[in-house]
Amino acid sequence: MSPGPSRLGRETLAAQPLNLSEERFIVHLPPHQPDRGFALLVFVPPWQDARLPQEWVSVLDRYGVIFVSAARSGNDESVSGRREPLALLAAHNIMKEHPVDPEHIYVAGFSGGSRIALRLALGYPDLFHGAILNAGSDSIGDGRTPLPPKDLFLRFQSSTHVIYVTGDRDTEHLVDDMVSIRSMHKWCVFNVEDYIQPRVGHEPAGAPVLSRALEGLLNGSRPDSSKLAACRSAIDSDLEKKFQKVQSLGAAGRRADVDKLLIEIDEHYGGLAAPRSVDLASK
């Protein structure tokens, strides 16, 4: 599998496929295969080595979850050049080699890796059906984590389960989680849970909270359909008002104001504004 274009923002993934013979991954395969097939957890690390926290092994085995993580995928590596494509390649190749239930493929990360996991969950909801964000998160719908094209974002809203896990002593990242969750609700993402680990600082999730998170992903429910529909309708209405203002400014010959407003729309609404924003800009 060669990495394709990124679905988030204007970055592109590596134009040439990564040479898998030169890459190293750690893979943990549970001893017993569930009847439905294995679940899969793709982990994006902040560190450079391919590592599995040892206390996670018993939890992964209990739930029948394959774990995979790439080396040289830490915070110092290129997001679009290595970190994202390595995670996608890891998922693809595990699915080729082992019987994986496609409905139970998840992405996770710790610290800086958790922020990449959020980007991957948002950009690839057709692959990842849930995310565990461990001590690292961003708000969505801004320059750092823009919204993907509308068809993908609708899928993210309706079928992706996002779980935040942070220690109660990791105050900086607890604040980040609050801001991120608030942005999720603003953009109609309601299938969200927040687990706080007692007496824990900035460190990977312990076995009990990982167990709780996996239990939530494997047995989670869908968001309330009427609440989701009403929220989506409100966003569509606000965006339509923005486009009507663009057209009014254009009709008045105020090109500079049109350009400024279209930039603001693209930065805020991301893929939800396309292709209409592009069409208006070309006119």
Image (tube, helix red, strand yellow):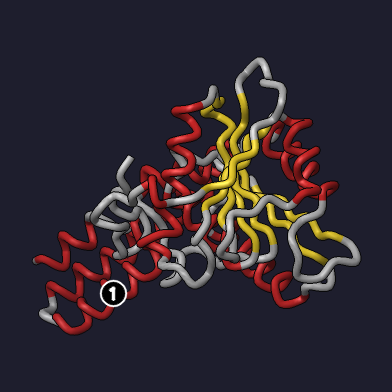
Which residue is pictured at 59% across the width and 41% down the height?
Answer: 27
**Is 48 left or right of 1, judged from the image as shown?**
right
Q: What's the residue type where badge 1 is placed?
A: Ile
Position of 271 relative to 263 (above/below): above
Q: Nearer the viewer, residue 223 or 177?
A: 177
- Which residue sits at x=53%, y=25%? 98
Tell me where residue 275 appears, x and y as whole percent.
Answer: 23, 54
Quarter of the figure with the N terminus: top left
Quarter that holds the C terminus: bottom left
Residue underneath mark 1: 263
**Res 129 → quadrant:** top right
**Label 1 Cα neighbours within 10 Å, binned few <14 / some 14-19 / many ≥20:** some
The count of marks equals 1
Q: In the image, residue 14 lies at what x, y percent?
A: 29, 58
Q: Please report the residue visible at 26 percent of the width from the left and 64 percent of the height from the top.
A: 244
Q: Is residue 179 above or below residue 252?
A: above
Compared with 40, 47 (above or below) is below
Image point (40%, 59%), residue name: 82
Q: Where residue 55 sits: x, y (%)? A: 80, 48
Reply above or below: 31 against 260.
above
